Amino acid sequence: MSNKDLLDSIKKLREMTGVGFKDCKIALDENSGDIEKSIEFLRKKGIAKASKKMSRTASEGLVLVEEKGGQISLIEINSETDFVAKNYDFINFCKEISKINFDCKGDLKKIDESKMTNGLLVKDNLVTLIAKIGEKITIRRANFFDNSQGFNFYYIHSAIQEGIGKIISIVKIDGIFKGENDNIGKKIAMHIAASNPLAIDKENISKTIVDKELEIIKAEITNSGKPSDVAEKISKGKITKFLNDNSLLNQIWIMDPKKKVSDILKENSSKKQIKILEFVRYKVGEGI
């Protein structure tokens, strides 16, 4: 292979894999200039590099949303640092994965096995990206809202680009009529992004969460030296407040502190009562 042919092959291999000049040259030398075998060689090398990084914590990254025909998908992809979350290659990878996520309807296993525009599987491109960037990158969670039973609305807090942010919420609402009360949908999604409710109503909050909170409240009151009968009354009041503060319908409306979300739904109902059917809120790194 002439020097020109070698340089052309290195350039092509770099474009296909995103790997550096030196590693591409080594791969081609090891595989007699065969591009396909060199890609396989580099992938194996990438897996070796990536595996060392998978024990690290990836709590930065991006949340991305796609909307088509009233259907909405949501996905969170994490990196170790915010610096990488602003990286051109990382952002482009995330954008393509977001589109794939919409087609896969939020199924992470299907996403992993899907082909990207370069012809390689998502899981293989992920390994290559990890090897190139040098950080742990994970496709953490995904969701999909179909267009049955009402309308879907989303809100991006401090959007970085169209469809990309650090906090994104989606809400499905019944009782919405276009041109009449559809403006309330995005406002509710905005409220969810800001107030982070745990469930739609008090009864829907996980018993495990409630029991744990009650345990913390009781321990705090007991440690303050209050008598047991007083402690019991205080704990009931505190847990009621906790349930109200964390259930969407009972939260104070962010745009009017004199009203609850349930009041806003009643005020904006038209031909039928507005009902929130489901919602989801992703904040980058939350819970990691």
Image (cartoon, grey):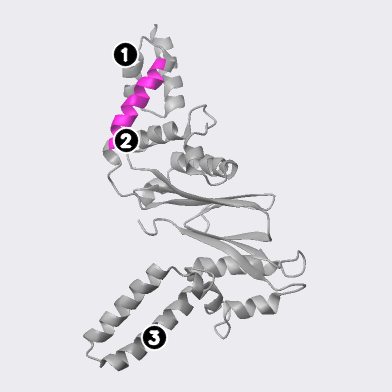
Label 3, on which residue?
Answer: 236
Q: Residue 10 location in percent, x, y?
A: 40, 19
Q: Nearer the viewer, mark 3 or mark 2?
A: 3
Q: Which residue type does callout 2 highlight?
A: Ala
Determine whether the residue tagged by mark 2 lies in a helix, strand or loop.
helix
Q: Nearer the viewer, mark 3 or mark 1?
A: 3
Image disc number at residue 50: 2
Residue density around tag 1, few if under 14, some if 14–19, many if 20 or more, within 10 Å: few
Q: Quadrant of the C terminus?
A: bottom left
Residue 275 drawn above or below residue 169:
below
Q: Is residue 197 left or right of residue 275?
A: left
* Distance Cα–Cα, label 3 vs label 1: 71 Å
Q: Please say whether residue 11 is one of the residues in the magenta stretch.
A: no
Q: Which mark is residue 241?
A: none
Taking 93 as reference, is 185 left or right?
Answer: right
- Nearer to the camera, 95 or 57: 57
Label 1 to label 2: alpha-carbon separation? 21 Å
Seen in the picture, residue 46 relative to 186 is either above or below; the reply is: above
Q: Nearer the viewer, mark 1 or mark 2?
A: 2
Mark 1 or mark 2: name the one nearer the start of the chain.
Answer: 1
The part of the chain drawn in magenta is 37-51
Q: Which residue is mark 1?
A: 30
Q: Position of residue 189 (x, y in %)?
A: 58, 65
Task: Looking at the picture, tell me which residue is in the foreground, 83 or 71.
Answer: 71
- Which one is earlier in the sequence, the residue at label 3 or at label 1? 1
3 or 2: tag closer to the N-terminus: 2
